[in-house]
Image (cartoon, rainbow, N blue to C red):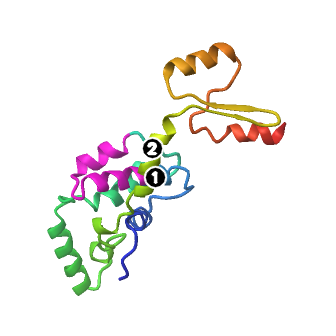
């Protein structure tokens, strides 16, 4: 089986456990699990539940998503017994599971994408304030709370944007 990026292994486990329907919540769950595995490659089932508790799911519900993720756990429902049961089921030509643990891609920490070191060099440069004047709008990037409060006093109706991509729709509609 080819080695794929670890997010692919996470997505595979959601899919095999039938944990994805509309896809609205899936990226958040994938990133929560990916972050957990980056910090702890052998999480417990409780660690997995804790990592996912701030995500919302409208369609599937949490059980199939967590079932898929719990297969990463070092103590996943006694993995040894499940593997033995799989072997027994194969010998008896039975198919009693959604997926076989032995068919899942392994999580491999060496396949994680690292944060680009070049961007770390830029972090000190982003501590300077920025002001961009456009035809219809001016953007400010304050670098201190005092500067932000001063801008809010000077421009009380200005929107505060923090990673808020939906604000672009207002500009398109105008």
On the picture, is 169 further left or further right than 14? right
Which numbered tag is attached to residue 155? Answer: none
Q: Which mark is residue 123?
A: 2
Question: Where is the C terminus found, in terms of image quarters?
Answer: top right
Residue 104 seen in the figure: yes
Name the residue at 62% across, 27% down: 160
State the image coordinates of residue 39 (x, y, percent, origin top left).
27, 52
Counting the numbered discs, the total is 2
Per the image, the residue denoted by label 1 is: 119
Residue 108 showing in the rendered view: no
Q: Is residue 10 left or right of residue 75?
A: right
**Residue 118 in which image quadrant:** bottom left
Q: Do the CB atoms of the residues marked 2 and 1 lie less than 8 Å apart?
A: yes
Left or right, 83 with respect to 136, comes to left
Q: Residues within 10 Å of mark 1 (few under 14, many from 20)?
A: few
Dominant SS of magenta comes to helix
């Amino acid at each position: 089986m080819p080695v794929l990026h670890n997010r692919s292994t996470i997505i595979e486990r959601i899919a095999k456990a039938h944990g994805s329907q509309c896809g609205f919540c899936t990226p958040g769950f994938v990133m929560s699990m990916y972050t957990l595995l980056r910090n702890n490659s052998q999480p417990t089932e409780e660690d997995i539940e804790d990592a996912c508790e701030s995500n919302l799911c409208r369609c599937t519900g949490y059980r199939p998503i967590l079932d898929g993720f719990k297969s990463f756990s070092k103590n996943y429902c006694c993995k040894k017994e499940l593997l033995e049961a799989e072997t027994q089921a194969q010998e008896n030509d039975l198919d009693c599971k959604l997926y076989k643990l032995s068919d899942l891609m392994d999580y491999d920490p060496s396949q994680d994408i690292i944060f680009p070191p070049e961007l770390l060099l830029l972090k000190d440069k982003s501590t300077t304030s920025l002001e961009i004047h456009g035809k219809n709008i001016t953007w400010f990037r304050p670098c201190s709370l005092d500067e932000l409060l001063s801008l809010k006093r000077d421009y009380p109706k200005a929107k505060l944007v923090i990673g808020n991509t939906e604000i672009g729709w207002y500009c398109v509609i105008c």
